Amino acid sequence: VDSDGDGRPDAGGIARRITDDPGLEMKPTWSPDGSEIAFHADAAGSPDIYRAPSTGGPWTRLTTGPARDENPAWSPDGRWILFHTDRIGAVDPSDSQVFRNFDLWAVDLAENREVAVTNEPVDEMYPAWSFDGCRVAYVSFDSGGRGDILVFNWPYGSCGGNTAAAPVLVAPVARMVL
């Protein structure tokens, strides 16, 4: 129950269903103002990024295609949703399996566009924003499966100053070994 209308259930209240699809919806993340929830869902066959009102209602599909777009992370200013994807992976014709190589991409909600953020031969996954929105941490897996946490400076907006339509591929500024 949301007795004060702020979109949050009262303590001890009843949970409200936001999605009701026969597929799988995962990794919900709140918009900074609490009005929406981003998540990935396989409603169209492969995981894509969606957003929906936090009170329930129609979904907006933000990414499309056969790639696995997963684990959204909403920027503190509400403009960007980072996610990891294997959309650049190649298909092996002998067994139709995608060689998974996950990279970070972002949806620019203000410009309604997607931009590549990383493009390395290793998997970059699980992005997380700093509280000021100027840095992003993520996990980079080497070919042996070892994961390191890397951090890069966000190249867009007030933090990076880039307003160009062309994507800016980033390089890590710090590495922490797990």
Image (cartoon, rainbow, N blue to C red):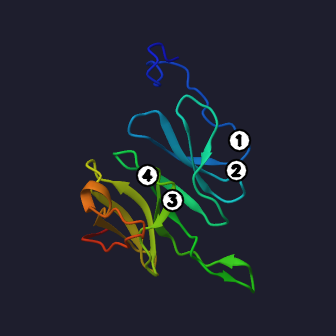
State the residue position of label 1: 21
Mark whose residue sits in front, 2 or 3: 3
Q: Please say if the residues under marks 1 and 2 sit with CB atoms less than 8 Å apart.
A: yes
Q: Earlier in the sequence, mark 1 or mark 4?
A: 1
Question: Residue 85 in the image: x percent, y percent?
Answer: 54, 66
Q: Decide: is 97 above or below 58.
A: below
Can you tell which mark lies on residue 43?
2
Q: Residue at x 60, y 45 (%)?
A: 60
Look at label 1 and name its amino acid.
Asp
Q: CA distance from mark 1 to mark 4?
A: 22 Å
Q: CA distance from mark 2 to mark 3?
A: 21 Å
Q: Residue at x 67, y 60 (%)?
A: 46
Query: Helix, strand, or loop for circle 3?
Result: strand
Q: Earlier in the sequence, mark 4 or mark 2?
A: 2
Q: Quadrant of residue 122?
A: bottom left
Q: Decide: is 10 above or below 115.
A: above
State the residue position of label 4: 73
Can you tell which mark lies on residue 72?
none
Q: Please say if the residues under marks 4 and 2 sit with CB atoms less than 8 Å apart.
A: no
Q: Earlier in the sequence, mark 1 or mark 3?
A: 1
Q: Earlier in the sequence, mark 3 or mark 4?
A: 4
Query: Helix, strand, or loop for circle 4?
Result: strand
Q: Residue at x 32, y 60 (%)?
A: 156
Query: Helix, strand, or loop for circle 1?
Result: loop
Q: Is residue 11 left or right of residue 99?
A: left
Mark 2 burial class by Cα count in 10 Å: few <14, some 14-19, many 20+? some
State the residue position of label 3: 113
Q: Quadrant of residue 158?
A: bottom left
